[in-house]
Image (cartoon, rainbow, N blue to C red):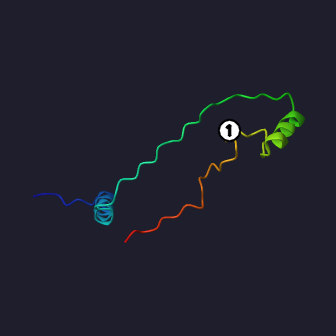
Amino acid sequence: MKAKSNNKKGDEASNEKSIYETEWQDMPEFVQNKKEPYAKIIVRFDNEADLQEFAKLINQKLTKKTKSIWHPFKSHWGNNTKIYISES
């Protein structure tokens, strides 16, 4: 006699995969290549005043916690003005 499986998580995962495969069937693959910078530099500041003077020169907000920026300014979250329009 075979024991009945009570593995609900396994059943749910299987069902989710089935829904995923059904919903996304024949969809084009999306690949977004990472944009590499032309050049990178490290700039060091002795104090907050120097940091803020530089921020003013390049017209960007910089804080002690700022790790990187694009110049000219580019949002780290992408360009929110792009939208998808169906061709059909």
Q: Give coordinates of residue 85: x percent, y percent.
A: 46, 68
**Of all residues shown, which one is farthest toward the front?**
87
Please state the horizontal and vertical placement of residue 75, each as a whole percent of the image: 65, 50
What residue is shown at x 47% (from left), y 43% (from top)?
A: 33
- Crowding around mark 1 (Cα neighbors within 10 Å: few <14, some 14 to 19, many 20+) is few
The one nearer the camera, 7 or 44, is 44
| Residue 57 relative to residue 71: left or right | right
* Above or below for 41 versus 81: above
Q: Position of residue 77 (x, y in %)?
A: 61, 52
Give the residue displayed 53% in from the left and 41% down from the top.
35
Query: Which amino acid does the dot numbered 1 rest on?
Result: Ser
Q: Residue 72, located in which quarter of the rendered image?
A: top right
- Residue assigned mark 1: 68
In this picture, is 51 found above or below 11? Answer: above
Left or right of 38 in this view: 68: right
Q: Is 57 or 22 nearer to us in this picture?
A: 57
Q: Name the residue nearer the viewer: 43 or 3.
A: 43
Q: Determine whether, in the image, residue 17 is placed left or right of residue 34.
A: left
Q: Name the residue rendered at 41%, 48% in the picture.
A: 31
Q: From this viewpoint, which residue is outermost toward the bottom?
A: 88
- Image quadrant holding the C terminus, namely bottom left
Look at 85% across and 27% down and name the residue there: 46
Residue 44 in percent (x, y) is at 78, 28
- For the N terminus, the image quarter is bottom left
Label 1: element kind: loop
